[in-house]
Image (spheres, rainbow, N blue to C red):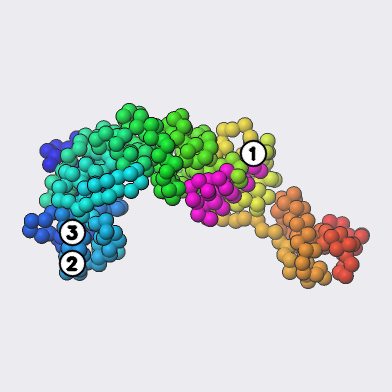
Amino acid sequence: MMPDPLPPSLDPHGPAHLLARDGVRACLAALRVEGEETRLVGGCVRDALLGQIVSDIDLTTTLRPEAVMDRARAAGIKAVPTGVAHGTVTLVVDGVPHEVTTLREDVETDGRHAVVRFGRDFARDAERRDFTINALSLDGQGGLHDTTGGVADLAAGRVRFIGDAATRIREDALRLLRFFRFHARYGRGAPDAEGLAAAIAARDGLDRLSRERVRAEFLKLLLAPRVVAAVTILSETGLLPRIVGGVGELGRLARCAAAEPRLDSTVRLAALAVRTVEDADRLQANLRLSRAEHAQLSGYAAALAVLHDRPVIDAGAMPALVALHGTERLCEVLTALDGEPRPQVTPEARAVLDRMEAAGTRPVLPVTGADLVARGVPPGQAVGAGLRAAQEHWLASGCPDDAAARERLILRALEAAGRWHKKGAGFPTPSANRTL
């Protein structure tokens, strides 16, 4: 048990606030059995000591999973057998999940999976965790238990493997990425030298991991406060290409991380690793991205291609760019490109974009296929040809939407449809004396 007082950089009241939560009190009370013990463990204890809001609640206990479920149900707490074979039961109190895991000891590990058995030794359970700052536990009486030096490391901003770093990574290669993520989240200064050396030496282990696990860990890393420093090290050590399949745009990531107010890991991934649509396709394959994430990266690539080819963007060009790409995607790309030679965005163009973003508006072509069919164009490819011509003219004109502009666009569309349909056989075309 850690002696008082805690280092001054840690919150002495954090553990008490954690124990005072209704769900925590209910779970600890339900699992209170003579001769058994249950403690809060891991990230919730770590974050409570840092004075941060605790979201995920984890507990560890000497009780077997079946006993945990029986005790919880007897206390009127919903018990969900989320991983009974591995010793994990989720107790739900007022809609909040509390994950309870029976103490475990490793029997065998192969870098991807571990064979474990249930135990009763909290110290041995702590030793099988990855980092010292994640091995802290808090008992129901407020006693803080630290058998690996996690409190000192947490106070110093030091992310350190428990025991031999190379051995811990061999047990689970994903710890290589977790080392960088936790350093980006909780570390200060340079990463732990032993841990960094072990991570670099174990780089081949990344290739044996499921891409889903790599994806989940890397996207979390991209949201960390010191993501740029961590990804820079990944790049310098040759680890980044094994993750994203190419080199990274560190400057663009830095600008995005500094300016992007929303916690969106896909935006940061785009800034770091997307230059073309092919990059988006490669990332989808390498990281098993969802369709929505792939669509977001592809949209970023399309907007990037258009913007990067323009030396200057003025106010007149902005409505068409918004119509094609939307304000959200344009803002993301312009943030990533800020400070680069191309494009130069005039203050007037930026003001137009800001107004459209604030209003949530996106110009829409004021002509539809139904308008053309109503003027006699047969449904089918002729309609498509007409709409493409109308859109091209509309975009070049700054996306007007008044009645006169709409009529000019319809005439332009009819003319194009007529050319496609061999000079309009079967439907009317614009009169030769009408101007567009």
**Would you say residue 330 is visible in this rendering?**
no
**Quarter of the image where the C terminus is located:** bottom right
Q: Label 2 sits on what residue type?
A: Asp
| Residue furthest left as drawn | 34
Label whose residue precedes the other's in the sequence (3 or 1): 3
Residue 200 located left or right of residue 106: right
Marking on residue 64: 3
**Quarter of the image where the N terminus is located:** top left
State the residue in front, 82 or 336: 82
Cα distance between the residues tagged 2 and 1: 62 Å
State the residue in front, 424 or 38: 38
Mark 3 nearby-residue class (10 Å; few <14, some 14–19, many ≥20): some
Marking on residue 277: none
Relative to residue 427, is residue 106 depicted above or below? above
Magenta highlight range:
279-308
Q: Label 1 sits on what residue type?
A: His
Residue matched to label 1: 308
Give me the residue at 67% from left, 58% from top.
Answer: 364
Give me the residue at 64% from left, 42% from top.
Answer: 305
Q: Quadrant of residue 157?
A: top left
Marking on residue 70: 2
Q: Quadrant of residue 168?
A: top left
